[in-house]
């Protein structure tokens, strides 16, 4: 089905996107999908300045007296010397939360590597977050753990009994996803695991990751989605029926 539909977002959502291997692409895709609503894109870290085609208007000042229009509004503090965008001040964010139907926040950074380890202060997820989407690329399976594949290598190695140049497998990804200091550290609201780049992955690697996740960890998630931002298609491969009953 259409990837955006897999996330089952509510009418009003503040979505923090964390992880590696597709965060920015997912944010821009979701913003375009909800372009007919009052949609905001922003960051709580530092990201490269978006292309002008990725938004309809930008609010890049600390003036909180603004009124959103329908379409995509970019919020942030430009760092022109490094061609990046930083988090807007909190009053600007809170004003956007009051007006927006959807807010999509890039809340993590991986230095363009497919995997990362997290410091204790990462990801930077604001308390108002209603849904946290953790992104992991399946295509990294078969590569080795090294500086070229992992941002913050020492922190990554500490997530499991990992070794330098060890082969990355679905079991390794499951450990990165489920450890207390891993993908969903500091997460808020519903937790959705998105296994990206399924079109590039070995057959059934998404289900191998799912099978390697403990039952106790799965109870913390709302959904597990396998799909592709490139094709904009996905499918729900696991749903927390208990959470659905409670809601």
Image: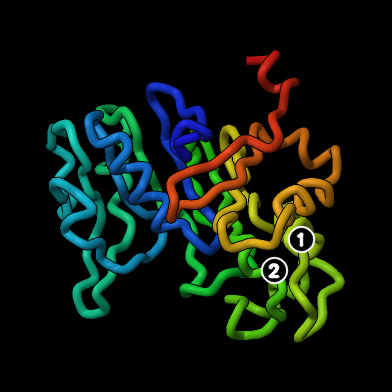
Q: Which mark is residue 170?
A: 1
Query: Relative to residue 38, is residue 11 drawn left or right?
Result: right
Whether residue 128 can be seen here: no
Whether residue 15 can be seen here: yes
Instruction: Say if 214 sits above or below 13 in the image.
Output: below
Classify mark 1: residues with Cα within 10 Å, few (<14), some (14-19) or many (20+): many
Q: Secondary structure at mark 1?
A: helix
Compare residues 165 and 140 and report the one nearer the observer: 140
Query: Relative to residue 129, is residue 138 drawn left or right?
Result: right
Compare residues 229 and 98 and report the one nearer the observer: 229
Instruction: Say if 85 sits above or below 13 in the image.
Output: below
Compare residues 32 and 45 and report the one nearer the observer: 32
Residue 20 position within the rendered picture, expressed as x and y whole percent measured from the top left: 54, 63
Query: Relative to residue 211, is residue 99 drawn left or right?
Result: left
Mark 2 lies on residue? 141
Q: Which mark is residue 208?
A: none
Residue 141 position within the rendered picture, expressed as x and y whole percent measured from the top left: 69, 68
């Amino acid at each position: 089905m259409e990837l955006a539909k897999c996330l089952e977002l509510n009418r009003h959502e503040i979505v923090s996107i964390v992880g590696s291997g597709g965060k920015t692409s997912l944010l821009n895709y979701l913003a375009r999908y909800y372009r007919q609503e009052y949609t905001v894109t922003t960051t709580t870290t530092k990201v490269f300045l978006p292309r002008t085609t990725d938004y309809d208007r930008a609010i890049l000042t600390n003036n909180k007296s603004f009124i959103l229009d329908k379409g995509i509004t970019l919020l942030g503090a430009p760092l022109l010397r490094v061609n990046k965008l930083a988090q807007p001040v909190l009053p600007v964010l809170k004003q956007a939360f009051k007006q927006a139907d959807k807010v999509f926040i890039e809340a993590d950074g991986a230095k363009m590597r497919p995997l990362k380890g997290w410091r204790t202060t990462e990801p930077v997820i604001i308390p108002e977050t209603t849904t946290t989407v953790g992104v992991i690329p399946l295509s990294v399976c078969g590569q080795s753990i090294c500086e070229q594949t992992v941002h913050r290598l020492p922190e990554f190695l500490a997530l499991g009994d990992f070794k330098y140049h060890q082969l990355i497998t679905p079991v390794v990804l499951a450990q990165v996803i489920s450890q207390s200091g891993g993908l969903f550290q500091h997460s808020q609201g519903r937790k959705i695991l998105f296994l990206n780049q399924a079109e590039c992955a070995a057959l059934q690697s998404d289900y191998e990751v799912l099978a390697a996740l403990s039952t106790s960890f799965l109870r913390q998630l709302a959904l597990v989605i396998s799909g592709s931002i490139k094709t904009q298609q996905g499918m729900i491969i696991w749903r927390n029926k208990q959470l659905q009953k409670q809601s």
